[in-house]
Image (cartoon, helix red, strand yellow):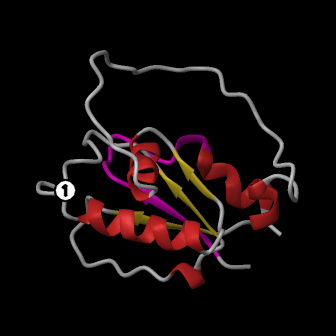
Amino acid sequence: MKPIYVFCHAPSVPLGSLECLPSRHGVELEVVRFYEPGDVEFDSSAASGLIVLGGPMSASDTLRYPFLADEVRFLRQMMAANKPVLGICLGAQLMAKALGARTYRNHTKEIGWHEVETVQDRREGAAWRTAAG
């Protein structure tokens, strides 16, 4: 099975509980750390899915963080290929931007832990279960 790419933007935003995915579910994670120097090339056909983590920047900070524009292009490729994508915080902002939505600064900070509800994909089961084989 092809790996699931994980985009990390800052050492302060680690994989956290996602680190258990390989041992619990038999998936391979290809972690891309944008805060480390070096060029990164993406090939959507080489990935079975994508997880985009959060970070201290905004989806609009492309002048200061040029790699964000590359991420938006890669997100578009992944979504066009109908591959599962999970965006967390900044990752969700980048997904919205890739889909053509306007992103902007919120008047109030939204930081903390919130409950998440699961939703069954009615077409063919949970997207991540499909990606995991």
* In-front residue for pair 19/84: 84
* In-front residue for pair 13/58: 58
> Residue 91 in magenta?
no
* In-front residue for pair 33/72: 72
Return the x and y of residue 119 as percentages of the image width and height. 78, 37
Q: Which amino acid type is shown beneath numbered disc 1?
A: Thr
Return the x and y of residue 106 as percentages of the image width and height. 30, 24
Give left or right: position of 13 versus 51. Answer: left
Q: How many numbered dots are placed on residues in this image?
A: 1
Give left or right: position of 72 versus 30. Answer: left
Determine whether 85 is above or below 13 in the image.
below
Return the x and y of residue 129 as percentages of the image width and height. 81, 58
> Residue 11 in magenta?
yes
Give left or right: position of 19 versus 70. Answer: right
* In-front residue for pair 92/111: 92
Splitting the image into 4 quarters, where does residue 25 fall? bottom right
Residue at the (33%, 77%) spot, across then down: 40
Q: Residue furthest top?
A: 108
Q: Residue furthest left?
A: 63
Residue at the (47%, 65%) spot, across then down: 75
Return the x and y of residue 126 as percentages of the image width and height. 81, 52
Residue at the (43%, 59%) spot, across then down: 7
Can you identify the residue that label 1 sits on?
Answer: 62
Splitting the image into 4 quarters, where does residue 102 fall? top left
Residue at the (26%, 58%) spot, across then down: 35
Location of the C terminus by quadrant is bottom right
Q: Residues within 10 Å of mark 1 (few under 14, many from 20)?
A: few
Give the secondary structure at mark 1.
Answer: loop
Location of the N terminus by quadrant is bottom right
Write the start and end of the magenta stretch as one range: 3-17
Determine whether 36 is above or below 10 in the image.
below
Determine whether 96 is above or below 22 in the image.
above
